[in-house]
Amino acid sequence: MSGTQLLDATGIAKAFGAVRALTDAGLSLSEGEIVALMGANGAGKSTFVKIITGALRPDSGKVLIRGREARVGSPAEARRSGLVPVYQEPSLIPDLDVADNLRLTDTRVDPFMRWVGELGIADLELSDMIGDLPLATLRILDLARALASKPDVLLLDEMTAALPTDLVDRVLKVTREQADSGMGVIYVSHRFSEISELCDRASVLRDGKTVGDLKIESGVEQRAVELMLGQKLELGNRGVAETRSRTEAAPRVRVRDLAIAPRVTGITFDLYPAEVLGVVALEGQGQDELFDCMAGFLPPSSGEIEINGKPADFHHPADAIAAGLKFVPGDRADALLAQRSVRENIALPFSARLRNWGNLKLQRERERVAHAIEKLQIDTRAQGEVQRLSGGNQQKVTIGRWLATGVDTLLLFDPTRGIDVRTKRQIYPLVRELAQQGASVLFYTSELEEIALACDRAIVIFNGRVVDVIDAADADDQTLLHAAYGLTAQEGAA
Amino acid sequence: MNTAATDPALVRFGRYLRDNPVVPLLAFLLLLIVMLEIMRPGIVTPFRAGRDGLISAFWVGNLIKFAIPLAMLAACQVLTMLTAGIDLSAGITATVAAFVCATLSSIWGVAPAVFVALSTGLIVGLVNGIGVGLVRVHPLIMTLGTGLIATGCLQVYQRLVINAGSEIPAFLSWLGTGRTLSMPNGLFLFVPFALFIFWLLRFTGFGRLLFALGSNENAARLSGVRAWQVYVALYVLSGLIAAMAGLLYLGMIRQTSLSLANPLLLPSVAAAVIGGTSIFGGRGSFAGAIVGALIIRVLDTMLTLMQMPEGARTVLFGAVILAVTAIYVRITASR
Amino acid sequence: MSDLIRKNAWVAGLVVLLAALLAITKIIQPSFGASGLESVARAALPFAFATAGMAVVVIVGGIDLSVASMMAVCAVTAAVLMEKISGVPAVMIVLALGLAMGLINGALIVVTRVPDIVVTLAMLFVWEGAALLILETPGGSTSEWLQTGIRGSLVPGLPNALVIIAAAVALVWVPLRRSRLGISIYATGSNERAAFRSGVDVGRTRILAYGVCGMFCAFGGLSLASLTGIGEPVPGPYLMASVAAVVLGGVVLGGGRGGLLGPIIAVFILRIVRTILTLLAVDPNVTTIIEGTIMVCVVMLGTALTLRGARK
């Protein structure tokens, strides 16, 4: 079945500052082939996709298209060389109508409309404004536009994520047909069921490196999960795994049927005092919205949050803080005053309220900041601006801010992303210690082994809903990853 | 991200300048004064022109005197720029305050006149603060708009009081033109004012919040800061300072005019930017702006000596603002 | 057809508002007729050009604070040139100058990566100073045919000023709007990332949009010089007025949406309001205050609506 080689990427490496997103990634694709690109969160999938499609330049490595080196400096060039991507977020211009969007990429109307029909959208007018169309339609239009340009290689990035099932079936069918007539397809997805139905091979990325190339056959899920996990660094042992009986206390935070448009549809859980509750989810399953909502950034669409038995109604993060919910966001850049000192960063919440606008209580501030710095072992040798600290120390500053004010409930969103192992090892005991002192911690992590190291229980979120609750004692990586991919019984039944 | 060792020299130099802007600025100021002396020997050092004295106290006093109102308006720009804003209504606010004070003094007496004059600054600032903080209009557009309205109000007001005449309160003349030990009396107002701004920025929660909002408004929100409160207070303060600067300037010029302090607006922005305050927020100091104001005054003298036309000066100030900002963007590789 | 109406609902609303205001004018001053209309159109001309230029850069996702200053540069250049050379080449030179100034603005924004609002604030002063350097005090003179051509109505009931604005927009914007560049301008303003992914050269598009803005400012400067007969180096009150008219005209601050027709109708609405206030014998200075307040309120409302839209 495999014909001439269409795409051959080898030795791709890319670093962003000190963070090495890719070290040695590669992918080859022949005519008529559909290859799945897989990898756990943070494995470097999205960077790799951006490089093959020309949105980013690699630091080293080669991308050959039909044997010729492709100088893909821009998406337009990649498109001309025959590789057409369909990105996760639609790349249609919201304020232009369909016809203008086609003109922008020099797409001919007839084949486009034919593909739109083929893919199951019946009532599209060329004068429709993109901004007025539903998300699922946009994804189909993106795909139709890509197909209309008769690409050699089609890259589908989480193509089916926002689609209803009937459209998913159409997309899979059309993709298969196209591959059978010679096109090569790179299929980036989290969904095992689609991969095993559609793909010929699966290429697995881990920590910026291509670690395996699997033929799709029965039992491949197991093998892929193993490859994605790999041999993990020893992150240290969990302290005493004292599992408290949770019935003795009332929950500190009760979340019931929480829905947040558009992705979160039903989240229910309890968070008890002296508990670390893990959150397990693949990227984009609604965990971002959940944390934003609990921190007062996003209003819920329906459902309720109760804190110490009182219903929460947050209009501003200040309301959440007043109710005791302290949020450490996933992106440190969101939380830090990059140009200001460690001290000012940690002391920021002290001045937040109107009545603290006057003279600073420098003595008290110094003591509390010093306490937080000591507790977290923040390396403050680099005096001055926080942006000159290492990533790990920056993260400690964002946590230290709340330690200095005292913590009831801490919302940690992926606090160990992109930081060194040493700092990680300091963060787990800290989280445990906080819990021992009676604090509640909600802990989302993209690194599954951290659930066993730091948490008491974990909820698994898939597709905007809690699909499983796993006790830390049973939380080995495979169980978690299976659950996160929606492969557990609960999801099958749903 | 980077460690100091791997940074290019330019970046390290830029970082040094950012951390200690006042030192190189003072050096630059001295350099300009030396150049001025070379252009016109004896202007700073009378003995070279055959007169008495090593350094002309009169010249230095004059330099400081004319830099004071500029530095006060620059304070408005520094404070607002710390939050990534700007106050383009400061010039007209100063003018309005001066005009109102001069005309009302002859009708109601000095104290009520000063009070009303300061209130006009407060009102303009309040409108700015509401627009920027609550409606979230870009500060540039908002302050430009209120400036426009204030200009209209001033013209109407002028028609109302056209027959009342005007009077410059004696204490403002004393502050504006008098000298003590050959230094301008304006320092009696300015030194406490500068100390207040210094205290505000360094030792108060409010000052901290200004820096915080300008560095990362999201982080400030995350920490529970209700940004609109800060913006309203900030622009009210800026309006008050502008009104104060207008009163001082009135005492200095001793004339009323419908555009008295307006020409100070652009130099005040330039003084703040030259003084190391970032127009993108989060970084800046009033000390730098004071030196910036002195630099602009010396530059002004030089351009006058060179018989540089008004237009060239305006071009120069605009170009300086753009160049300093562009260099800053280049050095930090960020906005 | 209903689609067409829906897309242009805002513009249609503006037309109705304009008609209502004209009717009110007629009621207040029954003698208000063709000549009154002509003088309104004439006074609106520089505002209309400033607004057209501003609209283009707002659509591309920027803002140009230097419109009034560029108009001043063009006006004094025209007045100085026309004293020496004949009108037509002078007009061409001024248009080229406007285009060049706009391109410089755009290039500085793209090259320095300093935000639009900061660059054009600095350029506001640079161009203002340049105008003063060209002509220190009001002076020069403009060609006779320009001064007469801009007045009166060749076609009865249709003021020449209105014909001029329509012709200029038709020459510059109409061919552009449907071209690839026009689509790219909307695409860049609407979603820069998606535009880049669709193969738009975002930097070039922005520079050219600023160039178009400069060109409209040149038209504005020429009409200014023709109306007064001389060159005036001090920038007029066109910045705030153009921002307000752009917002009122349905162009969203932030880019991507709207056209030129709406903003130009909005200019006439704002001018008619002024006429009505004058006819009501309101003190012209009070009129300034009312106008300023209307503009600020329009911008505030526009910002609030944009923010609400973004939150959805």
Image (cartoon, rainbow, N blue to C red):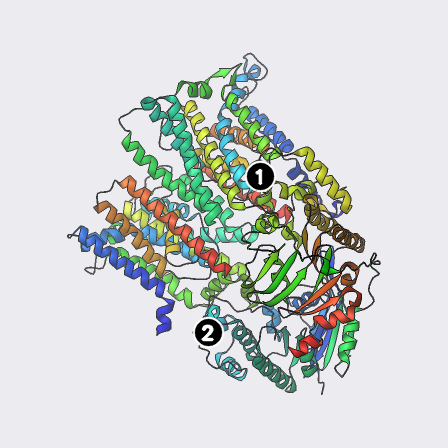
Say left or right for A53 vs C290. right
* Host chain of mark 1: B
Measuring 45% from the left and 29% from the top, which residue is drawn there?
B244
**Residue placed most toward the observer, A425 or B303:** A425
Say if residue A102 shows up in the picture: yes
Q: For mark 2, does the 10 Å Cα neighbourhood hold few (<14), some (14 to 19), or many (20 or more) residues?
A: some
Quadrant (top left/top right/bottom left/bottom right) for the C terminus of chain A? bottom right
Quadrant (top left/top right/bottom left/bottom right) for the N terminus of chain A? bottom right
Amino acid at pointer 2: Ala
Question: Mark number for residue B277?
Answer: 1
Residue A484: x, y in percent?
70, 70
Say if residue C233 shows up in the picture: no
Q: Quadrant of residue A89?
A: bottom right
Residue A251: x, y in percent?
67, 58
Residue A332: x, y in percent?
67, 53
- Give the residue at the far top of this rendering: B52
Above or below: residue A154 compared with residue B151: below
Q: Secondary structure at mark 2?
A: helix
Question: Mark number for residue A99?
Answer: 2
Calculate the distance from the C-alpha at mark 2 to the C-alpha at mark 1.
Answer: 47 Å
Q: Secondary structure at mark 1?
A: loop
**Residue placed most toward the observer, B164 or C195:** B164
* Host chain of mark 2: A
Measuring 60% from the left and 68% from the top, which residue is drawn there?
A266
Above or below: residue A232 compared with residue C133: below
Say left or right for C178 vs B75. left
Residue A106: x, y in percent?
51, 74
Say left or right for A13 vs A179. right
Q: For mark 1, does the 10 Å Cα neighbourhood hold few (<14), some (14 to 19), or many (20 or more) residues?
A: many
Residues at badges 2 and 1 in contact (C-beta under 8 Å)?
A: no
Above or below: residue C88 compared with residue A102: above
Tell me how many marks there are. Answer: 2
